[in-house]
Image: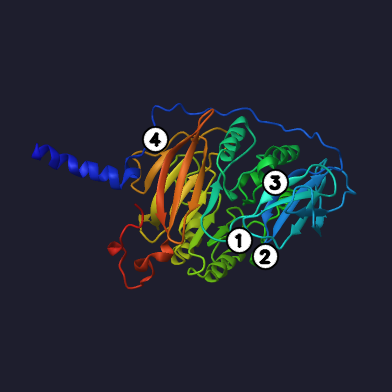
């Protein structure tokens, strides 16, 4: 009996203390096939707002964006904290663009505020159409982020958004590949209408993916539609490009990087990132998250090495700043790595998570390299979404929730500890091999 207990005790201890080490791809689960594109029609008048979405726009402010077919509709937002009563009013700007024979509607951007944290606001766009509402994020912990990459507009997209809605959250983060329009501009409009219920009620913060690139000889900009429709707070964060920027929520600094614009050492994005990281006070802002599209670490056979140039240029900046988590998309599957730096386990490096499984029309990336890398702790090709609940200055809970047809299922989860609280990681004299593991 004693001999049997001696063999069982280490196993039971491992299960209790390190449950995530036993998690793996569920081989009995049937992988989801791609589903049909949803084309969401326009059922409002020309002057009524459509494709309404909001984004954070500097401290205590929100940017409201919408489109009207009526080119004379005013760019105004009326808002207040009571249903149907608007005590405040703000006027903004508008833009439009053409792409071959396509002409966009009038795209309105109105910055409103200052706003109170954790407060529900009711608002109306352009003095016409339905009333919308949103809740501002909290100013202190806890705060919860939903993370979804490669969203698209398929039946799986609708399933993902339905699962997202099943539990409350504060901010929606999307690391690239929004509409999968690929130059077919009406799909941008369809996407905006599809996500309006979610994007008009919580801030959506996005960065570009490869499917946002629309670079043709007569359209050298490459991101005309994306930049016109999804204006992010780049100016508020000192960036000169809508393709990379940063913002803060509660005690969390979030950096959105551009995989498809300049990133080399000495480039505009590199210099901006270096300065942005230097401004973060980890005593006031203990958590740093980074989002980008093409993953720097990836054991799926799809898109191998496509983020390598950016990793070589920028990884050291993130490492020295003790970034906590790096989210990416592009690969249509889910994968969570241990803390990594320069292709080796390093307790002071970020946790890398690939979450390009929102609902794209191209299907899942089913094949992984074998044998599995010791850096990769969990990997699975299924549609789903992630949630990061930052509980306090030191701890956060991450879960990846796989889509089933009707229910969501937590397939991977782990508690994380902020590197800002790791004395060993900030001690330049400590050797990496002596560092303790921060995670449970």
Q: Which mark is residue 77?
A: none
Q: Earlier in the sequence, mark 3 or mark 1?
A: 3
Secondary structure of the residue carrying tag 4 is: loop
Residue situated in front as seen by the camera: 152 or 406: 406
- Judging from the image, the colouring scheme is rainbow
Instruction: Determine which residue is flagged by label 3.
Output: 200
Distance CA(mark 3)–CA(mark 1): 19 Å
Q: Which mark is residue 25?
A: 4
Q: Earlier in the sequence, mark 2 or mark 4?
A: 4
Q: Earlier in the sequence, mark 4 or mark 1?
A: 4
Q: Earlier in the sequence, mark 1 or mark 2?
A: 2
Q: Position of residue 321 (x, y in %)?
A: 47, 66
- At 76% from the left and 33% from the top, the residue drawn is 41
Residue situated in front as seen by the camera: 66 or 136: 136
| Label 2 crowd bin: few (<14), some (14–19), many (20+), radius 10 Å | some
Front disc: 3 or 2 = 3
Q: Is residue 185 above or below residue 347?
A: above
Secondary structure of the residue carrying tag 1 is: strand
Is residue 110 shown left or right of residue 257?
right
Secondary structure of the residue carrying tag 2 is: helix
Instruction: Determine which residue is flagged by label 1.
Output: 247
Distance CA(mark 4)–CA(mark 1): 34 Å
Distance CA(mark 2)–CA(mark 4): 41 Å
Q: Which mark is residue 236?
A: 2
Q: Earlier in the sequence, mark 3 or mark 2?
A: 3
Mark 1 touches mark 2? (CB < 8 Å): yes
Q: Is residue 188 above or below residue 391?
A: above
Residue situated in front as seen by the camera: 90 or 370: 90
| Label 1 crowd bin: few (<14), some (14–19), many (20+), radius 10 Å | some
Q: Is residue 221 above or below residue 25?
A: below
Q: Position of residue 244 (x, y in %)?
A: 62, 58
Q: Is residue 193 above or below residue 396?
A: above
């Amino acid at each position: 009996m004693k001999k049997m207990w001696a063999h069982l005790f280490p196993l039971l201890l491992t299960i209790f203390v390190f449950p995530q080490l036993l998690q793996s791809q569920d081989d009995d689960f049937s992988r989801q096939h791609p589903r049909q594109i949803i084309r969401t029609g326009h059922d409002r008048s020309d002057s009524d707002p459509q494709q309404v979405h909001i984004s954070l726009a500097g401290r205590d402010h929100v940017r409201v964006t919408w489109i009207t077919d009526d080119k004379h509709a005013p760019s105004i937002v009326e808002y207040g904290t009571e249903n149907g009563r608007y005590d405040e009013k703000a006027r903004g700007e508008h833009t439009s663009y053409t792409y071959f024979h396509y002409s966009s509607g009038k795209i309105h951007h109105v910055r409103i505020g200052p706003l109170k944290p954790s407060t529900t606001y009711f608002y109306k766009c352009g003095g016409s159409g339905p009333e919308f509402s949103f809740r501002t994020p909290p100013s202190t912990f806890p705060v919860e982020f939903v993370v979804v990459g490669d969203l698209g507009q398929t039946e799986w997209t609708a399933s993902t958004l339905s699962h997202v809605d099943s539990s409350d959250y504060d901010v929606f983060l999307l690391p690239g590949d929004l509409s999968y329009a690929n130059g077919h501009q009406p799909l941008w409009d369809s996407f905006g209408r599809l996500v309006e219920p979610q994007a008009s009620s919580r801030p959506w913060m996005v960065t570009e993916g490869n499917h946002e690139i629309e670079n043709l000889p007569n359209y050298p900009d490459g991101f005309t539609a994306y930049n016109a429709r999804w204006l992010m707070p780049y100016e508020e964060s000192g960036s000169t490009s809508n393709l990379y920027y940063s913002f803060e929520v509660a005690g969390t600094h979030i950096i959105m990087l551009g995989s498809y614009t300049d990133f080399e050492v000495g480039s505009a994005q590199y210099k901006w990132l270096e300065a942005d990281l230097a401004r973060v006070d980890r005593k006031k802002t203990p958590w740093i998250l980074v989002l980008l599209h093409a993953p720097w670490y990836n054991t799926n056979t799809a898109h191998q090495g496509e983020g390598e140039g950016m990793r070589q240029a920028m990884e050291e900046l993130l490492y020295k700043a003790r970034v906590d988590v790096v989210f990416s998309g592009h690969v249509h599957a889910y994968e969570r790595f241990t803390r990594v730096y320069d292709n080796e386990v390093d307790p002071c490096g970020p946790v890398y998570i690939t979450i390009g499984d929102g609902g794209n029309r191209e299907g899942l990336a089913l094949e992984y390299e074998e044998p599995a890398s010791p850096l990769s702790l969990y990997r699975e090709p299924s549609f789903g979404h992630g949630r990061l609940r930052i509980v306090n200055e030191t701890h956060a809970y991450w879960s990846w929730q796989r889509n089933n047809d009707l229910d969501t299922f937590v397939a991977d989860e782990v508690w994380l500890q902020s590197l800002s609280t790791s004395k060993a990681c900030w001690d330049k004299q400590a050797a990496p091999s002596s560092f303790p593991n921060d995670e449970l």
